[in-house]
Amino acid sequence: MPSKPFEDRTLSPYTGYTRAHWEAVADSLLAAVAPYATADGALYHFPGEHTSASGRLSDGLEGYARTLLLAAFRRDEKVLERYADGLAAGTAGVWPRVEHRSQPLVEAASIALALRLTRPLLWDRLDDGVRQRAARWLGDGLTAEPWPCNWELFPVTVGGFLQEIGHEPEASRAAIDRGLERIEQWYLGDGWYTDGHGRKFDYYNGWAMHLYPVLHVWLADDTRLLDLYGGRLEAHLADYARLFGGDGAPLLQGRSLTYRFATAAPLWLGALTGRTPLSPGETRRLASGALRYFLDRGAVDDRGLLSLGWHGPDDALLQAYSGPASPYWASKAFVGLLLPPDHEVWTTAEEPGPTDRADAVTPVGPPNWLLQSTTSDGVVRLHNHGSEDARYDPYYTRLAYSTATAPSAPSASSASSASSASSASYDNSVIVGDDPSRTEIEPLGVGAGWAASRHTVGDGIRVTSLVVARGAVEVRAHLVSGAAPGTSVRVTGWAARDGLRSELLPVLGLTDALTGRTHEGDTLFVALARLTGEPDPAPLGETVSVRAHGPGELDVRWSGGSGARVRLDGRGVEVTVRD
């Protein structure tokens, strides 16, 4: 990246970043992509051998649309001029049409939102012929069938702009109403959506399921719907703020992680609309922390381009739809630039986020998650007892994730080997026989310091899992049902990472190698786990004691005297917490 403004450790004691840094990063990203535009400006072809399943032409449109969105948030008239040229050429026959369940529908939403945000600077200055062609091209997005997930909001976003300019108002209204109605089936309360059918909980909650409807109704000045969708956003942010580590890192969980600091978008959105439980200083601390985290760790290459990955390039994070320009959905992070420079979110000193303030173990009801954070090392851990999408394993189906570790998996050459499953390659897993899978995840509840679920392994074997946590320490219990007597069972803990200590100690049913075997009927396996950055923590075995009281019954007692009484059986889990 080119040189950035000087850090301001008075205004921004946690990150050093100010509005000037956000502007400088936006300018640098926009300058870096300019050489990769085609002569007519309609497509942006970034270097690299990776092509999405949609093909090179669609990838080029993606490059135009997602960087246009960044230019729209930046509101630089000179930069917008080059996108005006690209719009004229693209709608003259260069761009692929928006069709049912096609990638251009996604990009049409970015283009429509950008045009709506910058109407006086871009749309109103176009020739009538260009406006008519652009409206017709976008108009296909009103009736194109989306995939049944966050894609339902793309016709809403297209319709919002076309309705504003008076193009096909009835069709636009119908597309808006249809999309908003469809996402209702996935709203589960407390600010949480699942991304389509099933239990897919991830960052799409923030950068899609909340972003599009809230921006739409805010731009439309619809106070009734802003109360509805803004209220949901506000509820979501109370949990969302806890997903960032002390170093700014978002949790490494879910899909499309190459969008990186797009995780900041809902934070700014709450400030923009006044629908947030966060103070202005906390909002900027979290958003700037995420931006700086990635910039400091190589997200931008030596050409100034965002790479496909997390820190630097990383093929493990990619999906079939990932193309060279896909990371530029990170542009959504710059929605904060819609806030004027004198807004208190820019002028108030940064304040600590949840992970900075105190250790916490927080239950999150709809996804059935338990969030565990520690101030001493700034690590946030997510215990996943309710989120699943088998298409993207291992980023959905592991028992736990953190801001400091990545899910591990065996290499492609060993993945088909039975011996690989019994290795430590699968972190945070219960491996029954040679099968590390975790499907049909059924949430069994969360509460003060605990979370539980049941899942299937292979053909009919069921595992009931429970975690009880305090500080950085976890008690993990797994009741295996339906396995033949003598079936091997292995439990694994956190993946290793430099600077962190990953521990796993057997308590019940396991050898020192963290392996055991089932017996007749249900078999209980218990271990202690810890992921910590503390240089000299107390011995794990001295922090908590666990004793069995009959089949499936445990007494957990922390060193300070508090604890819990736990019962696991085929019907579910019961937890009684003692202060």
Image (tube, rainbow, N blue to C red):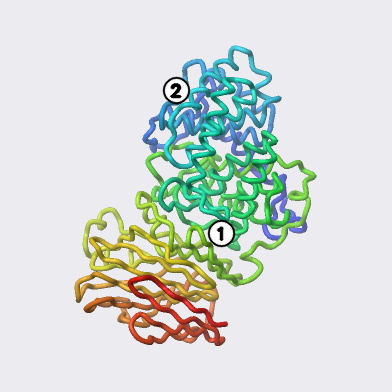
Q: Nearer the viewer, residue 344 or 311?
A: 344
Q: What residue do we see at 35% from left, 71% from top?
A: 571
Q: What residue do we see at 72% from left, 44% from top?
A: 20
Residue marked by disc 1: 243
SS at circle 1: helix
Against 233, is 304 above or below? Answer: above
* Residue 291: image location, x then y, percent: 60, 50
* Residue 526: image location, x then y, percent: 37, 78
Q: Nearer the viewer, residue 394 or 38?
A: 394
Against 341, is 140 above or below? Answer: above
Q: Residue furthest top?
A: 129
Q: Residues within 10 Å of mark 2 (few under 14, many from 20)?
A: some
Q: Quadrant of the N terminus?
A: top right
Q: Is residue 443 left or right of residue 284?
A: left
Residue marked by disc 2: 97
SS at circle 2: loop
Q: Quadrant of the C terminus?
A: bottom right
Q: CA distance from mark 2 to mark 1?
A: 38 Å
Q: Residues within 10 Å of mark 1 (few under 14, many from 20)?
A: many
Against 116, is 224 above or below? Answer: below
* Residue 449: image location, x then y, percent: 52, 73
Q: What residue do we see at 32% from left, 76% from top?
A: 514
On the image, which quarter does residue 98 sit in? top left
- Specify the amino acid type for callout 1: Leu
* Residue 408: image location, x then y, percent: 38, 60
- Specify the amino acid type for callout 2: Arg
Q: How many marks?
A: 2
Q: Which mark is residue 485?
A: none
